[in-house]
Amino acid sequence: MNAADTAFVLISAALVMLMTPGLALFYGGMVRSKNILGTLMHSNILLGTVSILWAIVGYSLAFGGDVGGIIGNLDFMFLKGVGTAAKEGIDNIPHSAFMIFQCMFAVITPALISGAFAERIKFSGFLLFTTLWLLLVYCPMAHWVWGGGWMAKMGALDFAGGAVVHMSSGASALAAVLYLGRRHGYGKQSFIPHNLPLTVLGAGILWFGWFGFNAGSALAANGLAASAFVTTHLAAAAAAISWIVVEWFHRGKPTTLGMASGAVAGLVAITPAAGFVEPMPAILIGLIAGGLCYGGVLAKNIFKYDDALDVVGIHGLGGTFGALATGLFATKAVNELGNDGLLYGNPEQLWIQFVSVVATWAFCFVMTLILFKVVDVLVGIRVSQEDENKGLDVSQHSEVGYQL
């Protein structure tokens, strides 16, 4: 047991926890003022609901003993045996430190999805969907990649959540918006962000917290954590620049929203690769991700789906690119527990990453469609047109965000 490693992982867990309120601000500033509280609630309530679900059964399903490569067993249900002793295979920190670090990942992932269906979902339907999604989508995904499941056995590389967090939320977001349909008036009237300073503040908090997200995934205060910290920052910086450059050429002006979105796109893309690639490839990943995700956001206008806050274009596309880029740029020189990618003489790794991408998108997309249908039948999933016109703050929570 190592005191420095334990402190580092606990601080990293706190940083990841802060990302969820940061995400709430990032999303909240982009919606109309009548939906600010409803949007904040979609992220912040998950600090409550997901944390309790994780402690009762979610952690065990994700990280319990492997059952057929698909799911964990119930050995850790109600956190039985999850205490101050080390977890098998992770002997430098308490088991409880690893559990709570992973809890914060479980909290923010369904919160990411909420940006796609912002301004039109019932709060009761949201809570039920999130509960089912965590147990039936997130926990299996976490087990497949990090808990000894079939993707881990196949050799898929995902340092901090390209598949588990970003592709899963992006694929689920696409399924959600296709099921729910567009907001009333979408394509006919402007849906203008009501408070971009709030969004920029949220992006800054996300960037700050992401160091815990990625560097913390080393699970030790060591050289690998430092490497992941550096690659994380450089990719975000590069993507913030490339997004606004592309936007400048395309729209004629660089925007603050573009800068914030570009930084997040870079953070998303580097997440699976952070602990496997060197700094210069990380910059290249960020540069490509900024322009690519900008194009992904424009795609919703071509295909006419209403991804309100660009979850598919940033998290779905960015996570997918990051996973594939890991198959290109990964090197054992950074992480001997990883593998070399295509550009380091191992083309098989790129194929493994591709298989993991296809499996993640297919599983998460189909399961989300099924869960939305189930929730719609049980409690309803979309607010009425009248409630949507009033705004979620009044119709779902009987309060308003601003008294001006």
Image (spheres, rainbow, N blue to C red):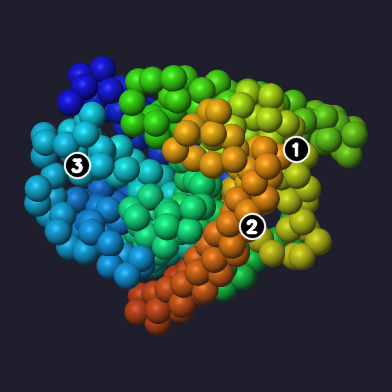
What amino acid is at disc 1?
Answer: Ile
Which residue is found at the position 45% from the left and 25% from the top?
Answer: 224
Say whether residue 308 is visible: no
Please state which of residues 81 and 185 is positioned toward the viewer in this rendering: 81
Q: Kindly check if marks 1 and 2 are in contact, taking CB atoms under 8 A apart as contact.
A: no
Residue sticking out furthest to the bottom: 377
Residue 363 at what x, y percent from top left? 50, 69
Which residue is found at the position 48% from the left and 58% from the top?
Answer: 154
Image-quadrant location for residue 241: top right
Residue sticking out furthest to the top: 4
Residue denoted by label 1: 288
Q: Kindly check if marks 3 and 1 are in contact, taking CB atoms under 8 A apart as contact.
A: no
Name which of mark 2 and mark 3 comes first in the sequence: 3
Residue denoted by label 2: 351
Residue denoted by label 3: 87
Which residue is found at the position 21% from the left and 64% from the top?
Answer: 73
The mark lying in front, picked from 2 and 3, is: 2
Instruction: Report helix, strand or loop for mark 2.
Output: helix
Q: Is residue 110 left or right of residue 190?
A: left
